[in-house]
Image (cartoon, rainbow, N blue to C red):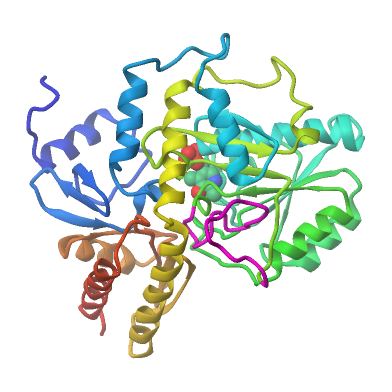
Amino acid sequence: MAVLEHISSQEAMALENKYGAQNYHPLPVVLSRGEGVFVWDVEGKKYYDFLSAYSSVNQGHCHPKIVSALNEQAGTLALTSRAFYNDMLGRYEKFATQYFGYDKLLPINTGAEAVETAIKLCRKWAYEVKGIDLNKAKIVVCKNNFHGRTTTIISFSNDPVARKNFGPYTEGFIKVEYDNLKELEETFMAHDDIAGFLVEPIQGEAGVYVPSEDYLIKAKALCEQYNVLFIADEVQTGIARTGRLLASCGNCSCPKRDCSGTPDVKPDILVLGKALSGGMYPVSAVLSTNEIMNVIQPGNHGSTFGGNPLAAAVAISALEVVRDEELALNAERLGKLFRKHMNAYIEESKIVRLVRGKGLLNAIVINDDEESDTAWNICLRLRDNGLLAKPTHGNIIRFAPPLVMTDHELEECVSIITSTLKEFEA
Ligand SMILES: *Cc1c(COP(=O)(O)O)cnc(C)c1O
């Protein structure tokens, strides 16, 4: 079959249903093209993308600079494996460590792999530096976390759909309530074999839960007090999404950003993925200090594709776009505008309970229970009206457009969203 042969939406969906594993429940829309904040379906209908592939496409679809970096490198050298050096990886590692303010980077491909890497790194540090007894190290995680779908990661999830019938589970994790410093401190006090605290600066999949202002900074202080590594999973919140380069922020090179007066946390281990490549290619990374990263020796960890020259070229370009187009500032300004408009709508609304978020990572909570299909039906109607979003956890709709949006486009999107919601007001 010719790759470019046209197929209809119905045909494309039927093919996936017949020949694909049914591990997703997609909104019925079949996309075939993207540019900036827009995507088009196979029938040519244009939509605003308000998911951005779960915050991967922060730089906008098919950003010309990233496409050109990809094309140029693809035609030069794509993959060597780490059996040999390549002339792009070191350049990327220098660029990215300076960009985020760390000593060393470990390159890998997907978000889940990067979380797995951080877990291994933390455990090895626990035995070799902190001196925890062999195989006793614990990592504290938060309830309702989302860190990916591998066997170890689902072992410390509390989502029954992600866990059920996938046991036996990996040991060594303790769950605490998110945004609860008292429980965190009690847990640190009760165990002397804790190696790390793994946390999302905002819980994205859980429904965009923004913790209290001082949560991260105080959690980090507790980690320092108890010699526990603070591991930030910024796979979704990172790369300008929440109006700062990182949602935890830190000693980074945020352009023209004045962080004074706001909580400033520098994770011991930083986990990145998704928009690290502008959604162009699977690129993820773990960043840390020399002291921590040096516990990793040849053979301890690896991936055939991790650190390939194509990934390196794409990631440099994607990070340059974030810096040069000041996407953090754009996300912060547009996020405020979005929540202002949504809050004004909610004052008069029966169907929407609240809006929450930071920068352009936002969600509305539908005034209904988790089992109802109202949020799904709203997303179908949004699709009909030219905007794509997806419910998370039944009654929550996440809104996360590409960060390259203009004020005018955002105003148009707000009017699509509010006029669609009006159709559902009783
Ligand atoms: C998406 C996500 C992951 C997993 O990334 P994949 O590339 O899908 O494996 C991990 N952590 C967070 C916070 C995420 O949002």
- Magenta highlight range: 240-261
Residue 108: quadrant of the picture: top right
Front residue of 375 and 231: 231
Q: Is the magenta stretch mostly helix, strand or loop?
A: loop
- Say which residue appears at 66% left-offset and 45% top-offset: 101
- Say which residue appears at 53% left-offset and 61% top-offset: 256
- Residue 63 visible in image: yes
Residue 83 position (above or below residue 45):
above
Left or right: 139, with 156 as reference point: right
Q: Where is residue 410 in the image (x, y as percent from the top left)?
A: 29, 68
Residue 257: quadrant of the picture: bottom right
Residue 246 in the magenta stretch? The answer is yes
Left or right: 98, with 7 as reference point: right
Q: In which quarter of the image is the C terminus?
A: bottom left
Q: Position of residue 347 (x, y in %)?
A: 38, 89
- Say which residue appears at 72% left-offset and 67% top-offset: 180
Residue 34: quadrant of the picture: top left
* Residue that extends furthest to the bottom in the rendered view of this protein: 348
Q: Position of residue 49 (x, y in %)?
A: 28, 55
Residue 64 position (above or below residue 248):
above
